[in-house]
Image (spheres, rainbow, N blue to C red):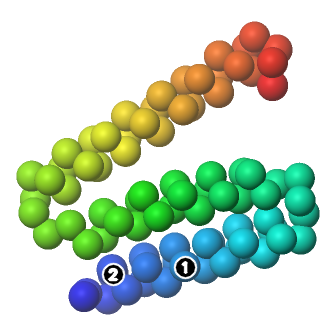
């Protein structure tokens, strides 16, 4: 693996550890910590894709998922739910 992939993997593991510590320390954020860990694992799985076409497809799916989540958040805030 290249140095960039190793650094990204180390960062992902660090954030997963932070999520685990926060989830264990504060029970109210346990569900959010689990969701955050699953998101990071999904993003981290792109580090091991070697096929360019598959990587591009996965990156586009993740990009559109993040846009959709941001749009839903905006609608919820505008509607006064959050």
Residue 71 occupies quadrant:
top right
Mark 2 Cα-neighbour bin, 10 Å: few <14, some 14–19, many ≥20: few
Eyeballing the image, is 2 above or below 64? below
Give the number of marks.
2
Residue to which mark 2 is pinned: 4
Say if 20 sits above or below 72 in the image. below
Q: Residue at x 80, y 65 (%)?
A: 23
Relative to residue 35, is residue 54 drawn left or right?
A: left
* Mark toward the viewer: 2 or 1: 1
Image quadrant containing the N terminus: bottom left
Q: Residue at x 37, y 34 (%)?
A: 64
Q: Position of residue 42 (x, y in %)?
A: 42, 58
- The residue lying at 90 percent from left, 63 percent from top is 26
Residue assigned mark 1 = 13
Residue 17 on image: x %, y %:
66, 78
Q: Is residue 65 above or below residue 23?
A: above
Q: Is residue 75 left or right of residue 22?
A: left
């Amino acid at each position: 693996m290249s140095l960039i992939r190793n650094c990204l993997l180390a960062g992902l593991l660090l954030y997963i550890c932070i999520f685990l510590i926060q989830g264990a320390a504060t029970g109210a954020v346990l569900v959010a910590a689990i969701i955050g860990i699953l998101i990071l694992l999904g993003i981290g799985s792109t580090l091991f894709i070697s096929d360019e076409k598959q990587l591009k497809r996965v990156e586009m799916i993740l990009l559109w998922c993040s846009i959709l989540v941001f749009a839903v958040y905006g609608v919820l805030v505008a509607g006064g739910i959050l």
